Image: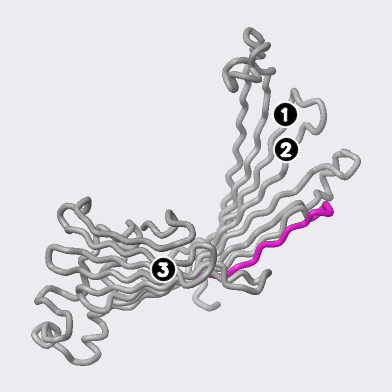
Amino acid sequence: MFGLAALRHVVTPSLSYSWSPAITKNDAVKNFTGVGSGGSRQQTLGFNLQNLFQAKVGEGEKVKKLDLLRVSSSVSYNFEAKGEKFSTLRTSLSSSLLRSVNLSGDMTHSLYDDNDKLQWRKPRLKSFSISTSFQAKGSVGDNFARQGLDQSARDTLPGATGASPLVPSFDNEQSSENKAGSETSWNLSVSHYFSESGLSTSSMTKTHWIRFTVDVNLTANWRIKFSQNYDIVGGQTTDKTIDIYRSMHCWQGYFRWIPEGSSKGFYFRLNVSAIPDIKLEKSESGIRGALYH
Protein backbone atom coordinates (compact mmCIF):
# COMPACT_ATOMS: atom_id res chain seq x y z
CA MET A 1 0.00 0.00 0.00
CA PHE A 2 1.54 3.32 -1.14
CA GLY A 3 4.81 1.44 -1.62
CA LEU A 4 5.01 0.65 2.11
CA ALA A 5 7.02 -2.52 2.73
CA ALA A 6 7.33 -2.56 6.53
CA LEU A 7 6.94 -0.55 9.74
CA ARG A 8 9.24 -0.76 12.75
CA HIS A 9 9.06 0.64 16.28
CA VAL A 10 12.36 0.72 18.21
CA VAL A 11 12.19 1.26 21.98
CA THR A 12 15.38 2.14 23.87
CA PRO A 13 15.06 2.48 27.67
CA SER A 14 17.96 3.63 29.85
CA LEU A 15 18.65 4.13 33.55
CA SER A 16 21.18 6.37 35.26
CA TYR A 17 22.19 6.76 38.88
CA SER A 18 24.18 9.50 40.56
CA TRP A 19 25.32 9.94 44.15
CA SER A 20 27.45 12.49 45.95
CA PRO A 21 28.17 12.76 49.67
CA ALA A 22 27.37 15.74 51.83
CA ILE A 23 30.21 18.27 52.04
CA THR A 24 30.12 20.38 55.18
CA LYS A 25 33.78 21.33 55.63
CA ASN A 26 33.27 24.83 54.25
CA ASP A 27 29.56 25.02 54.86
CA ALA A 28 29.79 28.30 56.75
CA VAL A 29 31.13 30.17 53.72
CA LYS A 30 29.39 28.39 50.84
CA ASN A 31 27.07 31.37 50.28
CA PHE A 32 30.13 33.40 49.38
CA THR A 33 32.31 30.91 47.53
CA GLY A 34 29.65 29.09 45.46
CA VAL A 35 29.81 25.53 44.10
CA GLY A 36 32.54 23.37 45.60
CA SER A 37 32.56 24.87 49.05
CA GLY A 38 29.81 22.69 50.49
CA GLY A 39 26.54 20.93 49.74
CA SER A 40 23.98 18.38 50.84
CA ARG A 41 24.01 14.70 49.90
CA GLN A 42 22.62 13.93 46.45
CA GLN A 43 21.13 10.63 45.26
CA THR A 44 19.19 10.57 41.99
CA LEU A 45 17.81 7.84 39.75
CA GLY A 46 17.06 8.87 36.16
CA PHE A 47 14.92 7.10 33.57
CA ASN A 48 14.81 7.80 29.84
CA LEU A 49 12.69 6.18 27.15
CA GLN A 50 13.37 6.72 23.44
CA ASN A 51 10.94 5.69 20.70
CA LEU A 52 11.89 5.58 17.03
CA PHE A 53 9.26 4.92 14.36
CA GLN A 54 10.63 3.80 11.00
CA ALA A 55 9.26 2.63 7.65
CA LYS A 56 10.57 0.81 4.59
CA VAL A 57 9.20 1.86 1.21
CA GLY A 58 9.82 0.58 -2.30
CA GLU A 59 10.76 -2.82 -3.64
CA GLY A 60 13.95 -4.70 -4.48
CA GLU A 61 17.05 -2.53 -4.78
CA LYS A 62 14.94 0.62 -4.46
CA VAL A 63 13.94 -0.02 -0.84
CA LYS A 64 14.51 3.00 1.39
CA LYS A 65 14.43 3.24 5.18
CA LEU A 66 12.74 6.34 6.56
CA ASP A 67 12.78 7.70 10.11
CA LEU A 68 9.19 8.83 10.64
CA LEU A 69 9.25 10.15 14.21
CA ARG A 70 11.50 10.26 17.28
CA VAL A 71 9.97 10.64 20.75
CA SER A 72 12.01 10.82 23.94
CA SER A 73 10.77 11.09 27.54
CA SER A 74 12.77 11.46 30.74
CA VAL A 75 12.11 11.77 34.46
CA SER A 76 14.22 11.41 37.59
CA TYR A 77 13.67 10.53 41.24
CA ASN A 78 15.56 12.37 43.99
CA PHE A 79 15.84 10.14 47.07
CA GLU A 80 17.07 13.01 49.22
CA ALA A 81 14.36 15.55 48.33
CA LYS A 82 12.15 16.59 51.23
CA GLY A 83 9.13 17.51 49.11
CA GLU A 84 8.38 16.37 45.56
CA LYS A 85 10.81 13.57 44.80
CA PHE A 86 9.90 13.14 41.14
CA SER A 87 11.19 15.71 38.70
CA THR A 88 9.27 17.26 35.84
CA LEU A 89 8.46 14.80 33.05
CA ARG A 90 10.08 16.10 29.86
CA THR A 91 9.11 14.89 26.39
CA SER A 92 10.62 15.86 23.05
CA LEU A 93 9.77 14.84 19.51
CA SER A 94 11.25 15.45 16.09
CA SER A 95 10.61 14.48 12.50
CA SER A 96 12.27 15.19 9.16
CA LEU A 97 10.03 12.96 7.08
CA LEU A 98 8.98 15.72 4.71
CA ARG A 99 11.70 16.87 2.36
CA SER A 100 13.23 20.24 3.34
CA VAL A 101 10.93 20.45 6.39
CA ASN A 102 11.99 19.84 10.01
CA LEU A 103 9.49 19.51 12.84
CA SER A 104 10.27 19.46 16.56
CA GLY A 105 8.35 19.85 19.78
CA ASP A 106 8.77 19.79 23.56
CA MET A 107 6.41 19.25 26.49
CA THR A 108 6.81 19.37 30.26
CA HIS A 109 4.40 17.75 32.71
CA SER A 110 4.19 17.81 36.48
CA LEU A 111 3.45 14.48 38.18
CA TYR A 112 1.89 16.29 41.15
CA ASP A 113 -1.40 18.13 41.55
CA ASP A 114 -1.87 21.52 43.22
CA ASN A 115 -1.76 19.82 46.64
CA ASP A 116 1.58 18.11 45.88
CA LYS A 117 -0.14 14.75 45.60
CA LEU A 118 1.42 12.29 43.16
CA GLN A 119 -0.83 11.49 40.17
CA TRP A 120 0.80 9.17 37.64
CA ARG A 121 -2.23 8.72 35.42
CA LYS A 122 -3.07 12.42 35.04
CA PRO A 123 0.15 14.44 34.75
CA ARG A 124 -0.36 18.17 34.59
CA LEU A 125 0.79 19.94 31.40
CA LYS A 126 3.03 22.87 32.35
CA SER A 127 4.36 24.01 28.98
CA PHE A 128 4.73 22.98 25.38
CA SER A 129 6.36 24.29 22.23
CA ILE A 130 6.44 23.36 18.57
CA SER A 131 8.75 24.62 15.85
CA THR A 132 8.98 24.02 12.11
CA SER A 133 11.51 25.06 9.53
CA PHE A 134 11.55 24.93 5.75
CA GLN A 135 14.44 25.51 3.39
CA ALA A 136 14.67 25.66 -0.40
CA LYS A 137 17.52 26.61 -2.70
CA GLY A 138 18.22 26.83 -6.40
CA SER A 139 21.35 26.43 -8.46
CA VAL A 140 22.65 29.03 -10.88
CA GLY A 141 23.93 26.21 -13.06
CA ASP A 142 20.45 24.72 -13.29
CA ASN A 143 19.03 28.08 -14.37
CA PHE A 144 21.70 28.47 -17.05
CA ALA A 145 21.10 24.96 -18.30
CA ARG A 146 17.39 25.63 -18.70
CA GLN A 147 18.25 28.73 -20.74
CA GLY A 148 20.66 26.79 -22.96
CA LEU A 149 23.74 28.89 -21.98
CA ASP A 150 27.18 27.26 -22.13
CA GLN A 151 30.19 28.35 -20.03
CA SER A 152 31.42 30.93 -22.56
CA ALA A 153 27.98 32.56 -22.62
CA ARG A 154 27.85 32.61 -18.82
CA ASP A 155 31.18 34.47 -18.62
CA THR A 156 29.70 37.37 -20.61
CA LEU A 157 27.00 38.00 -18.01
CA PRO A 158 27.25 41.17 -15.85
CA GLY A 159 29.60 40.60 -12.92
CA ALA A 160 31.14 37.43 -14.35
CA THR A 161 34.92 37.22 -14.07
CA GLY A 162 35.65 33.98 -15.87
CA ALA A 163 35.26 32.03 -12.65
CA SER A 164 32.08 30.15 -11.94
CA PRO A 165 29.32 32.51 -10.67
CA LEU A 166 28.33 29.72 -8.31
CA VAL A 167 31.10 30.60 -5.87
CA PRO A 168 30.96 34.14 -4.45
CA SER A 169 33.99 35.64 -2.74
CA PHE A 170 32.48 36.46 0.65
CA ASP A 171 34.22 33.85 2.80
CA ASN A 172 35.17 36.33 5.52
CA GLU A 173 31.59 37.52 5.83
CA GLN A 174 29.80 34.17 5.70
CA SER A 175 29.04 31.92 8.60
CA SER A 176 29.74 28.20 8.28
CA GLU A 177 26.09 27.69 7.35
CA ASN A 178 26.26 30.21 4.51
CA LYS A 179 29.55 28.79 3.27
CA ALA A 180 27.93 25.39 2.90
CA GLY A 181 25.28 26.95 0.65
CA SER A 182 27.59 29.30 -1.26
CA GLU A 183 27.22 27.29 -4.47
CA THR A 184 23.59 28.30 -4.91
CA SER A 185 22.06 31.31 -6.60
CA TRP A 186 19.37 31.68 -3.93
CA ASN A 187 18.41 30.26 -0.57
CA LEU A 188 15.02 30.63 1.12
CA SER A 189 14.37 29.62 4.73
CA VAL A 190 11.19 29.95 6.77
CA SER A 191 10.94 29.21 10.51
CA HIS A 192 7.87 29.08 12.73
CA TYR A 193 7.71 28.81 16.53
CA PHE A 194 4.83 28.55 19.01
CA SER A 195 4.97 27.97 22.77
CA GLU A 196 2.85 28.33 25.90
CA SER A 197 4.17 28.13 29.45
CA GLY A 198 2.69 28.48 32.92
CA LEU A 199 -0.45 26.66 31.77
CA SER A 200 -1.37 25.57 35.29
CA THR A 201 -0.82 29.01 36.79
CA SER A 202 -2.29 32.49 36.45
CA SER A 203 0.87 33.76 34.74
CA MET A 204 0.56 31.92 31.43
CA THR A 205 2.74 33.30 28.63
CA LYS A 206 2.47 32.71 24.90
CA THR A 207 5.14 33.12 22.22
CA HIS A 208 4.33 32.90 18.53
CA TRP A 209 6.52 34.14 15.67
CA ILE A 210 7.52 33.44 12.09
CA ARG A 211 10.80 34.33 10.42
CA PHE A 212 11.92 34.19 6.81
CA THR A 213 15.26 34.80 5.15
CA VAL A 214 16.13 35.23 1.49
CA ASP A 215 19.78 35.00 0.47
CA VAL A 216 20.67 35.65 -3.20
CA ASN A 217 24.03 35.44 -4.97
CA LEU A 218 23.35 37.87 -7.79
CA THR A 219 26.76 37.41 -9.45
CA ALA A 220 30.18 36.13 -8.46
CA ASN A 221 30.81 39.44 -6.67
CA TRP A 222 27.39 40.55 -5.41
CA ARG A 223 25.31 38.97 -2.67
CA ILE A 224 22.23 40.31 -0.87
CA LYS A 225 20.38 38.93 2.13
CA PHE A 226 17.04 39.94 3.65
CA SER A 227 15.64 38.70 6.98
CA GLN A 228 12.41 39.53 8.80
CA ASN A 229 10.89 38.30 12.05
CA TYR A 230 7.16 38.82 12.71
CA ASP A 231 5.61 38.53 16.18
CA ILE A 232 2.16 37.01 15.62
CA VAL A 233 1.03 37.57 19.23
CA GLY A 234 2.01 41.23 19.18
CA GLY A 235 1.02 41.73 15.55
CA GLN A 236 4.23 43.53 14.61
CA THR A 237 7.62 43.11 12.96
CA THR A 238 10.29 42.71 15.64
CA ASP A 239 13.37 42.41 13.48
CA LYS A 240 14.25 43.30 9.89
CA THR A 241 17.74 43.40 8.37
CA ILE A 242 19.19 43.87 4.90
CA ASP A 243 22.78 42.78 4.21
CA ILE A 244 24.74 43.54 1.04
CA TYR A 245 28.14 42.01 0.23
CA ARG A 246 30.50 43.10 -2.54
CA SER A 247 33.86 41.65 -3.54
CA MET A 248 36.26 43.95 -5.44
CA HIS A 249 39.51 42.19 -6.33
CA CYS A 250 41.55 42.47 -3.11
CA TRP A 251 38.84 44.41 -1.23
CA GLN A 252 35.58 43.35 0.38
CA GLY A 253 32.64 45.56 1.19
CA TYR A 254 29.79 44.90 3.61
CA PHE A 255 26.69 46.97 4.39
CA ARG A 256 23.94 46.20 6.92
CA TRP A 257 20.77 48.24 7.25
CA ILE A 258 18.19 47.88 10.04
CA PRO A 259 15.28 50.09 8.92
CA GLU A 260 13.25 50.04 12.15
CA GLY A 261 13.23 49.08 15.80
CA SER A 262 15.51 49.86 18.75
CA SER A 263 18.58 48.95 16.69
CA LYS A 264 17.59 51.13 13.74
CA GLY A 265 20.59 52.28 11.75
CA PHE A 266 23.34 51.03 9.47
CA TYR A 267 26.86 49.64 9.50
CA PHE A 268 29.37 49.86 6.63
CA ARG A 269 32.79 48.27 6.33
CA LEU A 270 35.44 48.12 3.61
CA ASN A 271 38.44 45.90 4.31
CA VAL A 272 41.40 44.23 2.63
CA SER A 273 40.51 40.60 1.82
CA ALA A 274 43.85 39.16 2.90
CA ILE A 275 44.12 41.36 6.03
CA PRO A 276 40.58 42.06 7.40
CA ASP A 277 41.99 44.23 10.21
CA ILE A 278 42.90 46.85 7.60
CA LYS A 279 39.49 48.44 7.17
CA LEU A 280 37.34 51.52 6.98
CA GLU A 281 34.03 51.40 8.83
CA LYS A 282 31.13 53.59 9.87
CA SER A 283 28.13 52.87 12.06
CA GLU A 284 24.99 54.77 12.98
CA SER A 285 22.60 53.11 15.40
CA GLY A 286 20.84 53.43 18.73
CA ILE A 287 22.56 50.22 19.83
CA ARG A 288 25.87 50.32 17.96
CA GLY A 289 27.02 46.81 18.83
CA ALA A 290 23.96 45.22 17.25
CA LEU A 291 25.17 46.27 13.80
CA TYR A 292 28.50 44.47 13.93
CA HIS A 293 28.47 41.31 11.82
Mark nearer the viewer, 3 or 2: 2
Specify whether residue 146 is in view.
yes
Report which residue position mark 3 lands on.
63
Where residue 78 sits in the image (x, y, percent)?
Answer: 72, 28
- 250 sits to left or right of 55: left
Neighbour tally class for label 3: few under 14, some 14-19, many 20 plus, Cα within 10 Å: few
Give, as a three-letter code, the residue at label 1: Asn
Give, as a three-letter code, the residue at label 2: Ser
Magenta segment range? 199-212
User: In terms of depth relative to the viewer, which is nearer, 172 or 4?
Assistant: 172
Report which residue position mark 1 lands on.
78
Distance between the Cα atoms at labels 3 and 2? 43 Å
Neighbour tally class for label 1: few under 14, some 14-19, many 20 plus, Cα within 10 Å: some
Mark 3 vs 2, N-terminal side: 3
- Seen at 32% across and 56% down, the residue is 176
Quadrant of the image occupied by residue 106: bottom right
Task: Name the element at disc 2.
Answer: loop
Q: Give yes or no for contact between labels 2 and 1 (Cβ–Cβ under 8 Å).
A: yes
From what the image shows, is residue 39 above or below residue 115? above
Give, as a three-letter code, the residue at label 3: Val
Mark 2 vs 1, N-terminal side: 1
From what the image shows, is residue 96 above or below residue 144? above
Q: How is the image coloured?
A: one colour
Residue 87's tag is 2
Specify whether residue 99 is in view.
no
From what the image shows, is residue 60 above or below residue 19? below
User: In terms of depth relative to the viewer, which is nearer, 286 or 141?
Assistant: 286
Mark nearer the viewer, 1 or 3: 1
Where residue 15 sits in the image (x, y, percent)?
Answer: 62, 34
Mark 1 vs 3, N-terminal side: 3
